Image: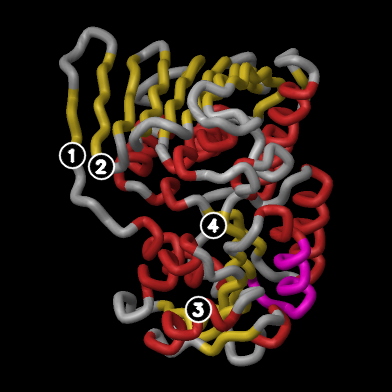
Amino acid sequence: MFKLGIVGLGAWGKRLVNAVNGQSDIVNFTAAATRSPSKVADFAAERGIMVSDAANAIYGGVDGIVVAGHAALHTSDALQAVEAGKPVLVIKPLATTRADAEALCAKASEKGVLAAMGYDRCFAPAMDALRRRVNAGDLGRVFHASGDFSVDRMLTFGADAWKADPETNPPGSMADHMMYMMIELMGPVTSLSVDATTQVVPHDFSDCASVTLRFAGSQTGTLTAIGVSPGFNRLHMYGDKGWAEVRGTNRLEYQPVGGDLIVEDFDPVDMCRVQLETFAAAALGDVAWPVSPEDAINGVGALEAMLKSVRVGGNRVDI
């Protein structure tokens, strides 16, 4: 059993724990670090997890660390784990600046341990099917992609919600699941622009953003990120031999030029569990982690550019 410690035991941290503890024969969490141990004491005790208010106190007896707390602390939390020789999975974003992402990856390379960026939709069955289609050449040259992502959780955000802070979650960043797949399959983003607006929430932060992307191979892309409408996600890729679209996590539609529409439906999986089990295997050197350091760094650079674009009135920013 691959034993994990987790830094950050908020809503998403608990989701990760519940995905594997008592559910997986490969990996489970045995330790957690959080700023308020008393708030999670019952949750942790029920799942056999030791809790501390100091991250370095949980390194002993675990095989790897998952960083799932405040985005602004991701780099420092991950670097501390890497310095201790622990492989680390950082739930997106890897960092809040490209410089920090580069520093983390460089330190992990120096120490000879894995520093992986995690996003669960990378492991969705339909996303994997899209990956196979593109890599097999079924779409030909992919020249444009569009991604849409919406949730309604901003409807309950207060004015001080950290996830609404543009410094750590730039407008448009909610759609980064789609962006990371674009980067994997189309190459690095080289420039972008953002049109961010406030449509619904009574606070001074963006709840609706549109992003236009330019890639190194001259391809283009668009992202739409909405925080005040029910959950929806879609990734559509256009190629000169056909198009393919992922709806949700379990359906892929593929339309070849001159052929019939092919619809593939997949059984659902717990993407968090698959992600954590894959991280364990990658940390042991049994498989390659699907997000390369270069792609993770480019994604962080794109998030940083989104904030810069908003600051300069939506103008295009190079990465």
How is the model colour-coded?
Answer: secondary structure
The amino acid on which the numbered mark 2 sits, given as a three-letter code, is Asn
Identify the amino acid type marked 4.
Trp
Instruction: Give the labeled residue for mark 2.
Output: 250
Position of residue 189 in the picture relative to residue 107 (left or right)? left
Q: Is residue 160 above or below residue 42?
A: above
Image x and y of residue 33, in percent: 62, 78
Decide which of tag 1 and tag 2 comes sooner along the chain: 2
Q: Quadrant of the N terminus?
A: bottom left
Residue beneath disc 1:
265
Magenta residues span 76-87
Where residue 123 appears, as percent x and y from the top left, is: 39, 51
Q: Mark 4 — residue?
A: 289
Residue beneath the point at 45% across and 38% down: 155
Task: Identify the mark at residue 40; answer none if there is no mark.
Answer: 3
Answer whether residue 292 is visible to the viewer in this image.
no
Tell me the mark number nearer the camera, choosing from 4 and 2. 2
Check residue 11 in the rendering and tell me which mark sits there, or answer none. none
Q: Which residue is situated farthest in the top direction here?
A: 258
Q: Secondary structure at mark 1?
A: strand
Does residue 259 sit above or below 234 in this rendering? Answer: above
The mark that comes first in sequence, 3 or 1, is 3
Q: Amino acid at mark 1?
A: Asp
